[in-house]
Amino acid sequence: MQAHLAAMLPAFQRGVVDSDHYATASTSQTCHTQLLREAFLEPVRKGKIVERILERTAGNLGDITPRVMDRFYAAIPEAKERFQFHQPVKREKLEGEMVEQALYCLMRWHTSRSEIEIILATTVPHHLVALDIPFEQFSGMVDAVCDVVAGTIPAGDEAEQRVWNDLHREIAAFMFESV
């Protein structure tokens, strides 16, 4: 069955196979179609929603690094000292890199999840052990990025709010499991 689903994916992505027509062919095919949608198309749909959210954020706010860092340092004031210790000359460069990395993970979570899981599974322990960064500071950076971006989602857009909140929750849970 997995081989059948994988073989159908390119046709569904190109729009060659009409999923509704395909679904009426038989009960077995209906089951396959539903599995295909859930396994392959739902992450694509969520990825497009995340892309739309991030594009709007960039268009409305530009570089979010200053806003993220203000929120981050307000929540975890001792983190500023830690950033200064690890990057005494150009702290802003390190801050920008951390925000960029968090955004990359958020942007690619749905469309390239295994890549992001590998990044987080190695990055989280490295920061905790080698750099002596408390988990709360590491996860706090992701929280600050998520909060700033969430502030750009229109209040009435429940689909965007749900996708973004779920994304934040999923990444936070995976980071916690990586410890």
Image: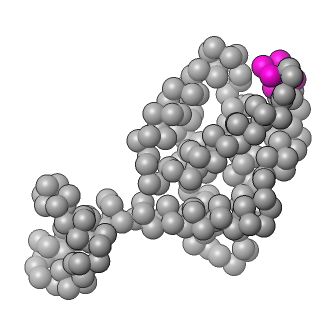
| Residue drawn at 19 percent across, 70 percent down | 31
Closest to the observer, 25 or 112: 112
| Residue drawn at 64 percent across, 20 percent down | 128
x, y percentage for residue 124?
58, 28
Magenta span: chief secondary structure: helix
Q: How many marks?
A: 0
Assess whether residue 83 is covered by the magenta stretch.
yes
Residue 52, by quadrant, is bottom right
| Residue drawn at 51 percent across, 34 percent down | 119
| Residue drawn at 18 percent across, 80 percent down | 22
Does any portion of residue 63 appear in the rendered image?
Answer: yes
Q: Is residue 88 left or right of residue 28?
A: right
Assess whether residue 152 is covered by the magenta stretch.
no
- In the rendered view, how is the structure colored? one colour
Residue 166's place in the image compared with 145, above or below, is below
Closest to the observer, 118 or 179: 118
Residue 171, by quadrant, is top right
Which stretch is magenta? 81-87
Q: Is residue 100 left or right of residue 120?
A: right
Closest to the observer, 100 or 170: 100
Residue 117's place in the image compared with 121, above or below, is below
